[in-house]
Every structure is written in structure tokens, then in C-alpha cells.
Amino acid sequence: MAAAEFAANQLAYPGTDQFDQVRWLKCAEFGVQGLMIPTEYGGAGRSAVEGALTFEGLGLGTSDNGFVFALSSQSFAMQRALVTAGSEEQRRHWLPKLAAGSAIGCFAMSEPEAGSDTGAITTTATLNPDGTYSLNGAKAWVTLSPVADVIVVFATTDPSKGHWGITAFILETDRAGISVGPLQPKMGLNTCPFAEVTFTDCRVGGTDLLGNVGAGGSVFSGAVEAERAFLYAAQMGSMERVINLSIQRARSRQAYGQPIGKFQGISHKIAEMKLRHESARLLIYKAAELYDRGGSMTMAGALAKLQTSEMAVQSALDAMRIHGAAGYTSEAGVEAELRDAIGGLSYSGTSEIARNLIARMLRVDRPIRTARPSKPPEV
Ligand SMILES: Cc1cc2nc3c(=O)[nH]c(=O)nc-3n(C[C@H](O)[C@H](O)[C@H](O)COP(=O)(O)OP(=O)(O)OC[C@H]3O[C@@H](n4cnc5c(N)ncnc54)[C@H](O)[C@@H]3O)c2cc1C
């Protein structure tokens, strides 16, 4: 797999948690950021299946899950929103730069007081008499924001309408009234920086609107629905890497005069890891294939996200058990896999929100309508 080979040769964990701009450019040269950008905007115009295959390869090839997460976050959330909702001018301006790696993009919906409940965001876009808007508020945990050149930001233009009062904007991050930082330290994915982004009377004009006024909720849902499935392709690749590490350990570590892989308690753990990985894989490619055929992604994306993120954590925990104390040290890299995997339980929506979506699609919450008793016939 070319992407796995590229990642193994070029994207090995650098040993520091600094975001590496040179490697970002190398990835653009290899075609990662432009993979799913249409050809007329400087990309390769590849399908979602090809996109997922590439990110699976990247996740398999390197243990630098943070860097691969950064690449997927831009590709599957920020760029998707721009490709699907951007004006011709916005696409022509930003997409070739994003594909070439000369611009980095981020996507800001979550706020310190509103994560899952996006209808409760309090960042406002207030209409000025001259037709511009003033953005005020703070966004939290914005992936890549400390290094980004362009931001897609969601603000409310009508707080009384909740989700339907949200509007999306796209603007450069050095616009007056935007401040980024400080860096928010986190548990894992450390080569991918995230931070708070604050807007203070930041002026945005009509050309900065991404889609129509009040359409931000659907711009967000559309991008996140796709993101939910594809962002996890890389995590699925790293699940395979964790299986390989565990097999190696099971074969090489001796206890009671034999390789630990001869103990059923160990070998069955690895069999379960394989099952989790394959089921995540089938769900992700089913979602990608549906996307390419223009089908609805809500159920497939939520199932793929839920299975991959939860199972990646389970498998990383099993890898820790298989590695014993060595796994608990930083040297073996297994504890980092667990810390990185845990991020997947929250980004792109939590597991509970995915379960809510699945249950809603199955109409679990709808009472069964019982037929009204018919009147007894009149005699
Ligand atoms: C590594 C990482 C990168 C991220 N990058 C970005 C980014 O680039 N841009 C961005 O906008 N955001 C980003 N986020 C934020 C992410 O989108 C939020 O963490 C996520 O939406 C959940 O919001 P929250 O953390 O505020 O949790 P909350 O919404 O506060 O939820 C807390 C708990 O309550 C549960 N809960 C909430 N509502 C319900 C419900 N209706 N039913 C059942 N349970 C519920 C949740 O499942 C969770 O367990 C990132 C997060 C991480 C970890």
C-alpha cells in the first residue's frame, strides 16, 4: 500500500510534539490534502473509498497518530465544508492552497460551554448597519488552529432559532479581532495542536459567508456526517498496527518456558482485536461506498464511528495487557496508542451522540400507535 509505505518512510514519530510544517508540505506533495479536492481546484478528485484507503494506509504506516489526525481533520471536516458549501470564489481562493499545503485549515464549532449541543453555541454574528457582521465569542479544542491560515467558524445569527439560527463563515485567521491560544495540553495526539479561538468584534462581510445565513447547521451536519465515517479510517489503520505489535510481543515474550502467544488468554485477545478491526473496516468502507453512490450517511457514518472509536480503545487496552509492564513504559509506544485512541471517543461527536443518532434512525423513541377501539355497531 503506497500510503503506508510513504507514512513509514516519511512520517515516523519525530520524537517531539511540535507540529512539523515540513512534513505537512511533504504530505501535500504526496497528494494527501488534495486527495478528495476536485481536480479543477488543484486536487486529485478521488472517491471516498480511495480517501479512506489512503488514510487507513497512513494510520498503518506511522505511529504518529496526531499528525495523521491533523491531516484527516482538515481533509474530512474543513475541506468537505468548503467543497460542498463554498462559493466559486471561496473554492478558487482556498482549495488549491490547501491541496498544496501552503495553507492550513481548521473547523470551529465546539465552545467551552457547548460541545455535543451545537444548538446552544453562544458565539454571535451580529448584523451591522453596513451589511457586515461582527463575530464575538470563543471556540474550544479547535484542531490545527495554532498553525492554521483559514478557519471555518459557526456562529449564531439568530439565537432564538437554535440549530436553524447558525451561520457558517470562512475567513483568514490573521483577520483583526481573532486571537488563537494558548495551546490546550491534552492526553494524546500531541503532534496535532489544538487551542481556543476567540473572536472580539471581528468583522466579516458577505463574501465570508459559507452558504446562506441560517444554513450553518446543515453545513455542519453535512461535513460532520461524512467526517464521522472517514476520520476514523486512519484510526482503523492504527488498530492494525497495534495488532501487529501485539502479535510480535506474543511470539517473542517468554513466560513459563514458552511464548506467551501459546496461552489462550493472550491468543484469544489477539483474535478479538482482529475481529474488532475487521468489523470497523467493513463499516467504514460501507459508509465510504454509500457516500460515493450519493446515499444517506447518517446511519452508516454513526455505526462506523462508534465501532471504530470504541474498539480502538479496547484493542489498545488489550495491547497494554499483552505487553505487561513494558507496555506501561513510553518506550514500547503502546501506552501512546491508548492515549491517542481515547481522543476518538470525543472528536467528531461522542459515542453517546452516535448511539442517539442510531437509535433515532431506528425510531426507538417513537411510541407504537395503537388503533383506536372502533365504536360498537349500533343496533
Ligand atoms: C482530539 C479532539 C479534537 C477536536 N477537534 C475539534 C475541532 O477541530 N473543532 C471542533 O469544533 N471541536 C473539536 N473537538 C471537540 C469535540 O467535537 C467535542 O469534544 C464533542 O463534540 C463533545 O463535546 P464536549 O466535549 O463538550 O462534551 P459534552 O457535550 O459536554 O458531553 C459530555 C458528556 O455528556 C454526554 N452527552 C451530551 N449530550 C448527550 C445526549 N444528548 N445524550 C447522551 N449523552 C450526552 C457526552 O456523550 C459526554 O459523555 C475536538 C475534540 C477532541 C477530543
Image (cartoon, helix red, strand yellow):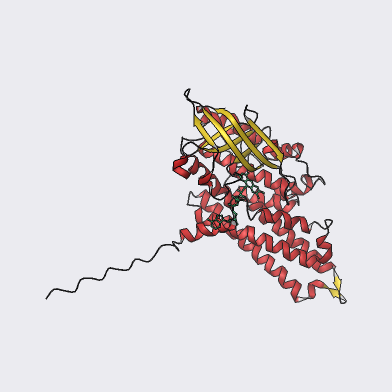
78 with respect to 260 (left or right): left
Work out whether residue 38 can be spotted: no
- Picture residue at 78% right of the left edge, 61% below the top: 245
Q: In this view, does 374 lie above or below 237?
A: below
Residue lying furthest left: 379
| Percent x, y of residue 98 | 64, 35
Q: Specify the quadrant of the image occupied by residue 321.
A: bottom right
- Picture residue at 76% right of the left edge, 72% below the top: 266
Which is more toward the observer, 143 or 115?
115
333 with respect to 215 (left or right): right
Q: Is residue 295 above or below residue 78?
A: below
Residue lying furthest right: 257
| Percent x, y of residue 196 | 66, 40
| Percent x, y of residue 329 | 83, 59
| Percent x, y of residue 32 | 67, 42
- Picture residue at 78% right of the left edge, 41% below the top: 18
Q: How many dots with numbers? A: 0
